[in-house]
Amino acid sequence: MNQNRVVFVNGVRTPFVRSRSVFQKMPAATLGGFVLRETIARSDCDPKLVQELYFGIVCPPPEGTNVAREALFDSGLPAEIPCTTVNRYCASSAECVSAIAAKIQSGQIEVGMAGGAESISSIRALFSQDATDFFQDLMRSKTTAQKLSKLTEFKPKHLMPHAPGIKEPTTGLTMGQSGDLMARVFGVSREIQDKYALDSHIKAHNAWERGFYKSHVVTIGTPDGKVVDRDTDIRADTTLEKLAMLKPVFYKDGTITAGNASPLTDGASAILMMSEKKAEEYKMKPLGFLRGYAAAAIDIKKEPLLIGPVYAIPRMLKQADVSWEDIDLIEMHEAFAAQVLSSIRAIESKEFAKDKLGLDRPIGQVDMSKFNVNGGSIPLGHPFGATGVRLILQALHELKVRGKKLALVSVCAGSGLGVVMLVEAA
């Protein structure tokens, strides 16, 4: 037995809620502290055993950019735990899992925690560089005369904030624009995107109704006395007709709408990890094990922005010494229905396998009865820093429900990054 095999002991997530709604007064560190505290409580683990914490976030607050540390303080866990904050865009918490796993496998630590949080509600408005320079120069002025002289340079536009955006500096395109272009490359129509989004909403609703999410989604009390016990963006009553009425968001002739894209969301997730030896020593009953991990990056000037995970899949399968046919479940992040459907076409394409991956056959056929069976990011929401661990928890709990063994977790991310992971049921 490999005593450094990585065990997932337990984990939780908050309900995922639309930004600037019920979690508006709860910053990322507060949400993160809650899931850290609850994960330890559910694991019945002495928090003093935790040796490191890695936590993901994409948009950290300016007053506390090491959100891992701030979440730890908020959780009440021992302040002696070293904390690292990771930003790999939408794959941030998945990368945190990889980092903790690597430390366990190398023998640096035996127990660690990974997770992530995002509060889109808390993102601050930005000011232009001209405005920043003006106010900094004004603060540096030492005499009244200098201050008055500097004030003569003031322009009303200095007070005009720049709305926070999610643009790629390299291409100048938003992720949504890139997703729309990806749909064109792979020939994914508006109609099939809407059908996929509808199915995801129905699956998420049904999963909540049968109690699946109660296994790992915890109830949150807000500062204003509200109780939030489930995800808020699931639309069980949506229809293809309603989705078809929505206008394209990014291009007039585009196919991505608010209905077939993931919403901006607040939320957090966390998971406790141990070496198998340590878990056995403390008689921990694991959720599962980490079998493989691979990351990829593509040239976003030449390739669709969100295709990265497809490049990582063959490497991960080889590392884990499993075939595509061995996989019992697939959990793929749904940034957009267009991105999911394009990725599926790439996975099944002989031409993509040959021209892009150097393979003599497709990665494999995607069995939709095994794919995002409890819904995905389109209905559940997508707090950037928390989604990776959400996918892992969902995969592990569904493997247990089905009595199956292996699940593939896939996360596309900004700037052409992609992460895939193979998890195994206990």
Image (tube, rainbow, N blue to C red):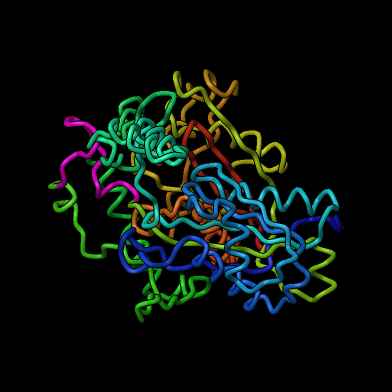
Quarter location, residue 15: bottom left
Give 402 or 280, whichever is nearer the viewer: 280
Q: Is residue 263 magenta?
A: no
Percent x, y of residue 325: 59, 44
Q: Is residue 146 left or right of residue 45?
A: left
Q: Is residue 113 left or right of residue 123?
A: right
Look at the magenta stretch and give its main secondary structure.
loop
Up-down: is 386 above or below 365? below
Q: Is residue 66 above or below residue 14?
A: above
Figure quadrant of the C terminus? bottom right
Which residue appears at 45% of the width and 18% of the height? 302
- Locate residue 392, reporting x and y percent: 57, 57
Question: Residue 382's spot in the image, x, y percent?
Answer: 41, 53
Quadrant for the N terminus, please. bottom right
Camera-side residue: 136 or 132?
136
Question: Residue 202 location in percent, x, y?
Answer: 31, 61
The boundaries of the magenta stretch are: 246-262
Quadrant of the image occupied by residue 109: bottom right
- Was residue 248 drawn as part of the magenta stretch in this picture? yes
